[in-house]
Image: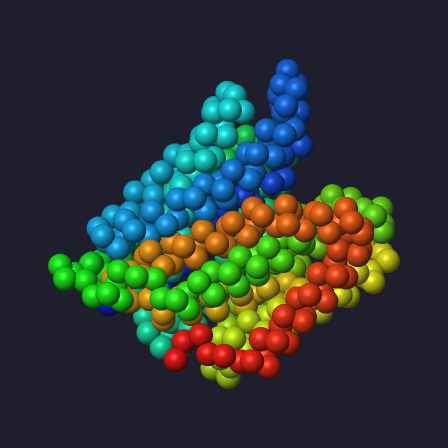
Amino acid sequence: MKNPKLVKTTILFCSMMSVMSGATISPTLPEMTAAFPGNPSAETLVKLVLTIPGLFIALTAPFSGWIIDKFGRVKLLVSMLAVYAIAGTAGFYLDTLFEIIVSRAILGIAVGGIMTTSVALIGDLFEGTERQKLLGIQAGIMSLAGTIFISAGGALADYGWRYPFLIYGLAIAAIPLVLLYIKEPPKAIKSALPTEKGQTIPKQAWMVYIIGFLGMSSFYMMPVQIPFFIKSVDHVSNAAIGLSLATAMLAAGLVSFNYKKFKNRFTYNQVYGISFFIMGLGYFAISFANSYLWVFPGMIIAGAGAGLVMPNSNLCMVNLASPENRGKVLGLLTTFFFLGQFASPLILQPLVNLTSITGAFFYLSLVIMSVALISLIRNKRLVK
């Protein structure tokens, strides 16, 4: 590897694209709805514009993993970056909501390929503590990029709801970087006589998939329910609500950057236990908040806990998988992550309806912390 710093920068730049898929256009949704007054279903369809990429990421990521195992990483990464740029910017010039939704579905397919390939490349090209550190930085960069792109999208939305779609064109800049600095790892190509390990998914991987699903479902309690919770306890602007969510993402990013320090001291299960316990503690604090300002401490704590879930899952799966099936294993992890995001309101809304938003945060916090304590007590190693 001639330029390891440029290789890392390129992979991290590509990783940012997955965050842009939803965050960039979030501030434009009200204006987009108003732009289609003749469509009685405009509000519902506009929300679908935001959520449809996540569904298609979950559905297609395993196929992306299979493709990169069979044909290599770089070809798919370059092609998905091109598709990402075309489909992402399509909202700037397409005329109907249906056309925009279709373009967003294609964008989701591209994101699934980019995200799976980026993590696989980290596993292929780096080892040991360097791999741990880079996976933590990757998760941190993704969290921090979310705050940046939400802000940029909001600023461009002041000029018109279509302008934030142009930000997706940044993917074009990543293509020459990939071609220049990312070389196909020789061991990533499936051998003519693959081993049994290279064909099957490790049994321990399914536990990580379930943990990843539950972690993302719990974390998305914040972006889905916090706006309603804050409105129920205080009268603040939408910008103030956005600030609270950005603060949680910032806390998650800062903790992700320091993931290596946690992993050097604790096992995978211990890191999961610490992560879920801190997240539960944050939700417990939120359940007792009676004003906007008192929501912040809980948001920061919960965000900090969530910052360990993604890098811990990625590193565990990278180490569990063989080079021959790494793409397939990581593709399924991407699927479970985004299924967790998609399913979060479906799973937790019944709890809100049965109790209240406050009650939902309270009871969820008790469940999360109980599971975390059991995990810490058992401390069974996921990877020997």
From the image, which quarter does the N terminus lie in?
A: bottom left
> Quick one: which residue is furthest to the left in this view?
192
The residue located at (83%, 60%) in the rendering is 289
Relative vertical location of residue 38 with respect to residue 280 in this rendering, above or below: above
Tell me residue 23's x, y (percent). 56, 45
What residue appears at the point 25 percent right and 48 percent down from the top-left corner? 75
Asked whether the viewer can see residue 363, the reply is: yes
Query: Along the line of sight, which residue is nearer the eye, 5 or 17?
Result: 17
Considering depth in this image, is 217 or 172 the residue closer to the camera?
A: 217
Residue 329 rendering spot, x and y as whole percentages: 36, 59
Where is residue 270 shown, x and y percent of the image? 54, 78
Does any portion of residue 139 appear in the rendered image? no
Q: Along the horizontal axis of the image, is 73 left or right of 278?
A: left
Q: Is residue 316 left or right of residue 23?
A: left
Q: Quadrant of the C terminus?
A: bottom left
**Total of numbered circles in the picture?**
0
Outermost residue on the top side: it is 38
Looking at the image, which residue is at 66% across and 59% down? 247
Q: Residue at left 59%, top 55%?
A: 217
Residue 215 falls in image quadrant: bottom right
On the image, the x and y values in percent for residue 306 come to 59, 64
Question: How is the model colour-coded?
Answer: rainbow
Instruction: State whether residue 42 is above or below residue 208.
Output: above
Looking at the image, residue 100 lies above or below residue 217:
above
Instruction: Name the outermost residue toward the bottom.
Output: 265
Is residue 246 depicted above or below 275 in this figure? Answer: above
Q: Nearer the viewer, residue 71 or 194?
A: 194
Is 121 or 293 nearer to us in this picture? 121
